[in-house]
Image (cartoon, rainbow, N blue to C red):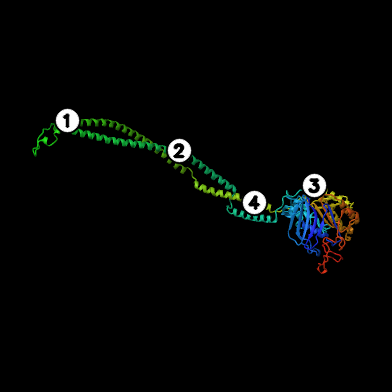
Amino acid sequence: MAIILTTLKAVGVDREDAEIPFDAKRQVIRGPSETGKSYIRDCLWYMLGGEKPPKGIPLAEGYQELQLRLAADGNQYEVRRGLSGGGEAIYHRPLNNPDASAFEPLEDDLGDLLVKLSKAAGKQILRNQSDRGPVTGDDLRHWSLWSQTEIPGEDPTSGQGYATTKRISSFNLFLSGTDDAAIQVNKTKAEVDRIKGQLTSAEAALERTKAGLPDDVKREDVTDALERVDRTLAAMTTQYEARSTLLKQMRRDIADTSDVLTRIANARNHAKSMVARFELLEQKYSNDLARLGATNEGVAFFQELPSVPCPLCGTPTEMQVDPQDLTPAAPAKYRVAIAAEADKIRSLRSGLLSALLRETQRYDTLRVEAERVAQLLNGLQRQEALAIEGSRIEFDADPKTLAFRRSDLTAQLAIFDEVERVTAEIARLKASSVRKRLVVNRDGGTHGRAVADRSKALLESWGFADIENIALDAEECDLVINDRPRLSYGAGRRALYLSSLVIALMEHALQEGHPHLGVVVIDSPLKAYADPRFQESTDVPLARVTDKFYAWLSNWSGNGQIIVLENEEVADATAEILKPIEFSGVPGLGRPGFFPHRDILRSNMSPGLFGDAPGSLGSVED
């Protein structure tokens, strides 16, 4: 892709439009000085994104806006900017759609749009030794639009100042199609200053860190001491773990034995309680038998006693008690009942004695077992006490003291590690703070050879048959002709040699599909060659060079668009084909200049804008 300029127009209220059409391939705008040719170049620079508006001239008074139309990628674009400055407005419409007559606004930035249309979007170029960035509209304009002073100038093609690096990079991008994305740039001065600040902080941190170490301590000593402490603690840990395992088993045995003893003691106490109860019950049975025996003897004695009246009142016995109790059978019944009750108690007592004997035996057995288990439990408890007591005297070192010592040694070792880290960081920062010169090998290679050969062919077609060899210095972005740098020649040859270079670069870039704006504007490439001040450079006749240059341009059909602004006249036969736009510089004779002629009071004219020549129209430079 590339752009094609179609028209440049200046409009204003109550002013006739000033419009310049451009042929899609080549356009010559010719006329004498002070007719506005260089003004057109300045307008194109401004309308393609330049910041500086064209110089104010009297004939431009009343004109408010410039409009530039260009075609690219199947669309027509119109850029509008105020002559007095400010931003741009962009409009577009399809080229091949007859119904799309009205332009629609486009929100793109002009520089970004030109970069995209020139296939340079996403390409990275060096801006300086420490910065890399995208291609901008300024890079495109610099290698496409050449002013009347730049063409024969003695300055390098990349210019002078801060922008030189990026212009060299963009030239080589157009030449080879390869950008600088893979080139590692240097650090900026701000980054280096920041690194130096970090270096100072790191050095101060190193001194603070070293202050935490004794003067005579060495890392090896600290490491050895830490290993010894770790071995001691490991041995103690191993012993404690073994003893802990043993104690755990002992305590499990103690717990199990204690549970057994508890169960036996409970059973023993229960047997003892039963024995006591049975003994108490046996005493009750004995007492009951004794009472029943005494009762039986009393009843028997009562039977043997005679019946006598009351000694006091003389009342007979049978009148004092129930007569039934005095019958001979009554005491016998009592004695039978007593005998039956005594038999029952004796029977119960027999079973009780058997149970008492069994519980007594059980109690004795449980008592003996309880004593045995209690002795076993006491033995286990003594073993536990001995094991615990043994751990207190087995190690001379105190684990707490060893732990504190290990903490101190670990802290010292951490300080040594920090010293090593900070020292390494200081070394890295010192290496990073050095800004090495960025060396980029700009070798045009086959692309440079192709552009040089194309430039040679152009110069030969323009009449320069004395060129024996030609090369492209990609580092200088310039030609070396007959083993001489272009800038070593006179102004006339410098101008034409540079013209051949920028045209050849455009053709090569577009042919190879490399980024390029697609248009070259050259202001007065022949003027310096025709200037009497540079006659020493015109070893090839001017008429010959002029005629051949215009004849070549009239038949040129290469890649891109060429716009030439020139003073030198075009031969009639060539003009029939080339159809240049002629500025007469004379009111009423053809087209006077860029702006339509109108009378301007001499008092309103700024000195130096018109010159002293009659008929001057007040444009810049030309």
Which comes sooner in the sequence, label 2 or label 3? 2
Report which residue position mark 4 lands on. Answer: 425
Question: Would residue 165 be visible to someone looking at this image?
Answer: no
Q: Which numbered mark, 4 or 3, is in the foreground of this view?
A: 3
Residue 499, position in %: x, y?
84, 54
Label 2 close to label 3 by CB (< 8 Å): no
Report which residue position mark 1 lands on. Answer: 332
How far apart in space, not on screen, are marks 4 and 3 (Cα)? 48 Å
Q: Which numbered mark, 2 or 1, is in the foreground of this view?
A: 1
How far apart in space, not on screen, are marks 3 and 1 (Cα)? 156 Å
Label number found at residue 249? 2
Residue type, numbered disc 1: Ala
> The C terminus lies in which quarter of the figure?
bottom right
Which comes sooner in the sequence, label 2 or label 1? 2
330 is higher (above) or lower (below) than 21: above
Which comes sooner in the sequence, label 4 or label 1? 1
Q: Residues within 10 Å of mark 1 (few under 14, many from 20)?
A: some
